[in-house]
Image: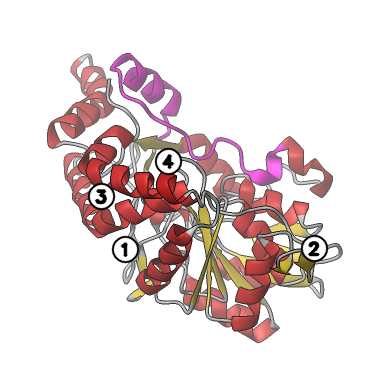
Amino acid sequence: MIPFVDLKAGYQAIREDVHTRINDVLEHGKFIMGPEVAELETRLAEFVGTKHCIAAGNGTDTLLISLMALGIGPGDEVITTPFTFIATGEMIMLAGAKPVFVDIKPKTYNIDVELIEAAITPNTRAIMPVSLYGQCADMDAINAIAAEHGLTVIEDAAQSFGAEYKGRKSCALSTIGSTSFFPSKPLGCYGDGGALFTDDDDLATAMREIRVHGQDRRYHHSRIGVNSRLDSLQAAVLLAKLGRFEWEVGQRQVVADRYLSLLADVPADLLEPPEVMPDCTSVFAQFTISTPNRDALLQRLKEAGIATAVHYPIPLHLQQAFAPLRGKRGDHPVAESAAQRVLSLPMHAYLTAEQQKQIVEAVIGGRRRRRAGR
């Protein structure tokens, strides 16, 4: 069996450091928002290149916290993509605002910048692009549109922490950057975790208070907030992982390059590999191919003992949860087509060349058999 993500291999590489750091937490007993959290925030801000990092309970809460800090709520609209995990649109709705979906580009699966301006109305308050599959959206173009219309940009970077866009790190490309440390992410903890990034002092203060029930000091609440504190144990795990993170990002690129080489001869009408735009890097949170024969390929890989995933089978505008928005099939054709074609193959820093050969053989094996039978 080839797993989709090998978390155990990553753990074995840093086992001693993880145990030492977890033991320190157990000894000092400050299990929530302990000293590890403050250290983590400092190191993450330095890594990304922002003035502030605000750790939080998960990468879904961070989106909500960012919207709350901006005062976005009922009557407001936030432009985003329909081709993403539900958390993106879900948090806009939970804040009381309306998500306005804009279709995606076919190669990167990120929001189509050329369609954003037409979606802006007098009620638009923010743009929330998603840096999908590990590659940043076209943030300079998005920021320029936002500046022209007086809007704020929140990068949903749940899948792109560590990626670069024109020499700058994801999460440092807009007013607010939001990321996730879910275990399968390129930088993942051993539970839930997330973080927000900004250079804006006032927004940083607001987001720090919102994550602890709107509290500016103990039992003094300056605003309405949520409970989204990061556990010290998770911060300890992330600190242990940070020392190896850049190496792992480099290894993800090695694995991606190997996939691309092994798949190079497959005709584009049968399979399209992921494409990274010029001046960008990807952390390949997923290695997602596109194929018109997904169901058959899924079955073949399953029979070969290879784990896969589909990110994502139903665009948000067609999800029942968003039915009040009256989205319908045909509204966002590129996203709808992608939802029928995408398939994510195993991807992590510890995937071996032999495992990749087995995966690719299973991917293209059916094609070879069909051609041999003609």
* Magenta stretch, residue numbers: 291-319
Q: What residue is pinned by disc 2? A: 224
* N-term-proximal mark, 1 vs 3: 3
* N-term-proximal mark, 2 vs 4: 4
- Which residue is most to the left? 354
**Category of crowding for the residue at label 1, using alpha-carbon neighbours closer than 10 angstroms: few (below 14), some (14–19), many (at least 20):** many
277 lies above or below 368: below
139 lies above or below 272: below
Q: Secondary structure at mark 3?
A: helix
Amino acid type for the residue under numbered disc 2: Ile
In magenta stretch: residue 307: yes
Foreground disc of the pair 1, 2: 2
Q: Which mark is residue 281?
A: 1
* Contact, mark 2 vs mark 4 (Cβ under 8 Å): no
* Contact, mark 3 vs mark 2 (Cβ under 8 Å): no
Where residue 171 appears, as percent x and y from the top left, is 47, 68
Amino acid type for the residue under numbered disc 1: Thr
* Contact, mark 1 vs mark 3 (Cβ under 8 Å): no
Q: Which mark is residue 252?
A: 3
Q: Quadrant of residue 361?
A: top left
CA distance for labels 2 and 4: 29 Å
Q: Which mark is residue 151?
A: none
Amino acid type for the residue under numbered disc 4: Tyr
Query: Residue visible at 43% across and 29% down?
Result: 294
Query: Residue visible at 74% across and 60% down?
Result: 225
Residue 62 or residue 348, whichever sits in front: 62
Q: Is residue 37 left or right of residue 73?
A: left
* N-term-proximal mark, 1 vs 4: 4
Q: Secondary structure at mark 4?
A: loop
Q: What residue is pinned by disc 4? A: 190
Q: Is residue 79 visible?
A: no
Amino acid type for the residue under numbered disc 3: Arg
